[in-house]
Image (spheres, rainbow, N blue to C red):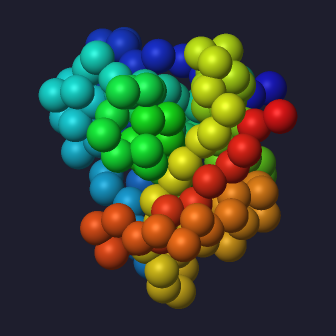
Amino acid sequence: MLRLEEITPDNLSAAVNIKVRPEQEGFVAPVVASLAEAYASRLTAWPRLVYDHDRAVAFIMGNFHPDNELEAFRCGIWRLNVAAEEQGKGDGRFAVMAFCEEARRRGSRRVTVLWEQGEGGPEAFYLRLGFKPTGEMLFGETVGELLLG
């Protein structure tokens, strides 16, 4: 039974204790860095924990900023950290789909994500979910998009 929860003082420790596999650490910032970024951009950032019953199993942070000068940053996933021991169970897919539902609720028809190329990186995961590379690169990363129906 998966669900999303906002980050609060009560679950902050659970959030920062989510660690990805060692070979993935070069592809995604630690949750604590993401939360600092969310705090700094609190008007547009959307950080959430994924729970499986009473266990925090993943963290997702997106951004909703429809007026951003960069189209890729108007509605996008900034971070996805799935706990190493929880990977392959559908928690990441759930987090991305929940973000997409929130995007639809807000009137967005397109979700973007940036990923770095490389072995152990998230590209295959996002492609399986239906994201397609746009051909654009930002900060050395591939921009992918998912058009919402």
Residues 21 and 75: in front is 75
Q: Looking at the rendering, in which quadrant would you find the N terminus?
A: top right
Q: Is residue 64 left or right of residue 96?
A: left
For the point 68% across and 64% down, the residue is: 132
Residue 87 drawn at (x, y percent): 66, 58
Q: Is residue 54 visible?
A: no
- Residue 109's place in the image compared with 90, above or below, is above
Going 42% across and 54% down the picture, which residue do you hit? 19
- For residue 101, which quarter of the picture? top right
Q: On the rendered image, what quadrant is the C terminus found in?
A: top right
Count of picture labels:
0
Q: Residue at x 51, y 29 (%)?
A: 49
Q: Is residue 69 visible?
A: yes
Image location (x, y in percent) of residue 82: 55, 51
Q: Nearer the viewer, residue 59 or 103?
A: 103
Lateral position of residue 78 relative to residue 3, left or right:
left
Q: Residue at image x 26%, y 20%?
A: 42
Q: Position of residue 108 (x, y in %)?
A: 62, 27
